[in-house]
Structures are given as C-alpha cells and as structure tokens.
Amino acid sequence: MFIQFYGATEQVTGSCYLIQSGDTRILLDCGMVQGSRLDELKNSDPFPFDPASIDAVILSHSHIDHSGRLPFLVKRGFNGPVYTQRASKDLCRIMLQDAGYLNERETEWENKKRERKGLKLVEAYFTVKDAQDAMSQFRGIQYGAKKKISPSLSFRFSDAGHILGSSIVECWLSENGINKKIVFSGDLGYPDRPILHDPTIIKEANLVIMESTYGDRLHRSPEQTYQEMTDIICQARSDKGNIIIPAFAVGRTQRLIYEFAKHYNDWDLDRWQIFLDSPMAISATEVYTKHTDLYDDEARELWNKNRSRPLLPNFHLSRTANQSMHLNTVRSGAIIIAGSGMCTGGRIKHHLKHNIWRHDCHIVITGFQARGALGRSLVDGSKYIKLWGESLKVNAQVHTVGGLSAHADQAGLMNWYSNFNNKPPLMLVHGEPESLQALQKAIKESGASAVSIAKKGQKLDLSSIN
C-alpha cells in the first residue's frame, strides 16, 4: 500500500500520483507540464510506470495540467476507466481535443523546420483522434457517490469549488487487514467567491495531499478586487485604448463574464464592446450553462433572471480566425478575452502583438502564471517580450488582479486543512518552492507537526502512517 509522487512536485503543473492498494493500481490525475518550451517538451517523455498496469484513473478536474496527458496514457497502453465528475467529463471532451489539435499544429511547424535542416521528423505525442479515443474511457460520476474500483480501493468526489466539476477526492484503501483513507484536495477554490459552492469540508483522513499554488500569499478581498477592476476600466476608458485579458478557457473566462454582467452598470460597460475570442472558451461556457445545478444560489438566480435575454448586450463571440483577425484593427473601446491564460499560445499572442506596444492599452492578468510562461514575464515587469522572433516594447499598462483567482490563498488552504480531526499528516504538492515553503511554515506554526513537501519520485508507505 503506497503512493508515489510523479508530477506537480515543487512546481504547479503536471499533476500525477500513483496509488497501489492490494493488486489495484490507480492514478490520481495525469496532467501536462506547462511553462517554458523546455518544460513542455517533457510531456512526450515516457511515463515512469507501465500505463498498461494502471487499473483506473481518478481525475480531479478538467484543467489541462491535471488531465492533459490522458490521451498519451491511453496511446501508450492504458485501457481502464477514467473517473471524473460529470461536468468535468463534458469539459475534458473540449479541452483534450483542443490540446490534440495544438499538438498537431506544433508538430507540423517543427517538422517544417526540421525538413529544411535535413533532420528526422517527429510525431505528435497525441492527436485529436487520440483525444477522441481516450474520451470513450471516461465515466461521469456525481458528487457524493461512493464508487468501488476493487475490493481494496474505493473513492468519492466532493465539490472543490475551483471550476465546474472540480473535485476533492477521498480514497479508501484496504490491504492485509490495514485500512487507510487518503484525501486529495485537487485544486481548491476560494471561499465566498461567485458561481460555485465553497470547497467541501472533510473531517477524516490518515493522509491529506493538498495543493499550494498560492501558499505564500493572501488574495485581495472582493471589495478590493471590485475597486481595482473599477479603476482599471475607468483608466482604460480615459486612455481610449483596449483592454486585453488573457484568460483560461475554463473557470476564469466564465468568472469574468459573470463579473461583467453583475457590475455592468457600475463599470459603465455599455461604453465598451466585449469580445470572447476563444472557440474553446465559447464551448466551455456552453457546458457551464448546461450544469447550472452546480452553481451557488446567487449565480443560479442571476442565470434564471437572464434566461430570455443575453447577460451582456454588447457581448460578441469570436469563433473564426477571420473574426479574430478583425479585432486587430480595433484601436479603442474593446475588451478582448482570449486564451491561452498564460500567454503561451492561442489568439492572445496576436492581441498582444497588436496592443502591447501602445501606451493607451491595458493588459489584465487574472490567473496564475507559471515560470517560463510569457504571462509570467509580464507579471515580473519585463520591458520587452518576444513574439515570433520579433522583440516588442511593453508600453501597455500591465495589471495583476489576484482577487479573481480560482485558487484558495494561504488562509483558505489553512482553513480547509484545519477542519480535519487530529491534524493528519499533510503532503504539499502543486506549488512553486516559495509557496510550498511558506505554507509549510505557516501550517506548522498553527500546530500541525507532520507537514512535508512532496519530492518527484518519492514513494510513501501508507501502511506506516497513523
């Protein structure tokens, strides 16, 4: 009976953990590494275990750093079920096919360069078809339903409040008369935030595995975030430029749309044209409208009031490449939401190319930016960025609005863990070193003693924990 940590160890992306109980072997998550190009090349590396030996995957949620290598896992021999919350299954169908498409495109570009240099061509590590094939192995599970995989392993999903369908995973293990319970936080949402419910409180565990993305900081309050967005929009209107918002297609985009609808009059948004320039985000938003039963009361009330009319009368969906390119001619009065959220690919790079050198434009960063990502360089204050070999001066004002985060901050993480009885052993994952160390120190100072930072490849004997 053991758990082995293969991903999101001392970094945020690439979530992947192997659990064995009796003869049953499962993965918790199977995510992509994101960040720099060198980081992302690791996604085509062989798995450090035999995919065919895995009986099932338990997927906490659809974000690509948790789900993105599942088609590759299937391609390499995994033929078991992938269990995830039913809304998460719907979102994965969109996100994994998009990831396959991007892999195909990037491989085409790479092979053109290789062909000119006389180098050996490479193969996309998974394609759109691979993603479609993998979806046949997905099984949608409701929150609260306990599922037995084998006599030695059962699990249950509870709402993590991070994005639609995001789950806290409780796993019950049994081997040679020894019974243990592991709780994996997945990505935890921020309490009292709109659309989704607060993260579910869990009381019992022998081991807790918890994310720590923002383990070294506190988010601004809703009131502060509201004022910050008010000031940004007011200043941008005065400057007569555009507002460019890199946003994750799932979670952040829907939160932005919600905030714009809620504060439409407060922010004088009738003076703007708002564009969602992301086919994947448009599809994800349609999934959100299908699963309103997962909303909190406030969001459900807003949705019900606006069923017969658009939430935003000046909201435009930019699906085609031509529609996206047209936005490059708009010089003023546009709020453009586009992916990718870390500015590593997608249409946002084109909007940065046409706006970032302009003094009258504003860039609003609303989500986590991994080291090596273009978005991280903007957050860190780079004076120049490089796009397609061209160096561009950063003249636009760059704003980082942390209060829109879908992740709990240090206080939120500590509060969630504090609800466990008897302060069970805690393994911290899914964070950069500074966040991990800060959160470890804070939790130890609060009275917990067994707080560790997971190391890549580390194997933990679960039968030995209390």
Image (cartoon, rainbow, N blue to C red):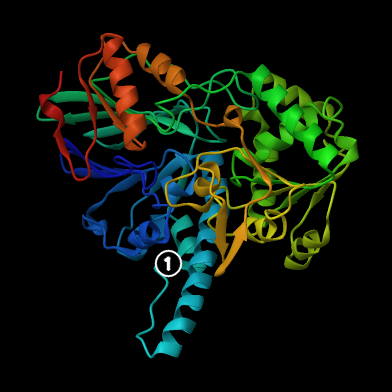
Indicate the position of residue 66 as horizontal and vertical percent values. 42, 45
- Regarding residue 146, the answer to whether it shows in the image is yes
Indicate the position of residue 55 as horizontal and vertical percent values. 27, 49
Q: Going 44% across and 17% down the picture, which residue do you hit?
A: 411
Residue type at mark 1 is Phe
User: Taking 199 as reference, is 259 left or right?
Assistant: right
Observer-nearest of 247 and 202: 247
Which residue in the structure is indicated by mark 1?
126
User: Taking 351 as reference, is 389 left or right?
Assistant: left
- Regarding residue 170, the answer to whether it shows in the image is no
Indicate the position of residue 155 as horizontal and vertical percent values. 34, 31
Indicate the position of residue 40 as horizontal and vertical percent values. 39, 59
Residue 432, compared with residue 227, is above or below; it is below
- Viewport quadrant of the N terminus: top left
Q: Going 54% across and 44% down the picture, which residue do you hit?
A: 381
Q: Residues within 10 Å of mark 1 (few under 14, many from 20)?
A: many
Quarter occupied by residue 388: bottom right
User: Taking 141 as reference, is 58 left or right?
Assistant: left
Q: Going 65% across and 20% down the picture, which residue do you hit?
A: 224
Figure disc tally: 1
- Viewport quadrant of the C terminus: top left
Observer-nearest of 382 and 51: 382
- Element class at badge 1: loop
Observer-nearest of 383 and 270: 383
Residue 208, compared with residue 69, is above or below; it is above
Quarter occupied by residue 171: top left
Quarter occupied by residue 423: top left
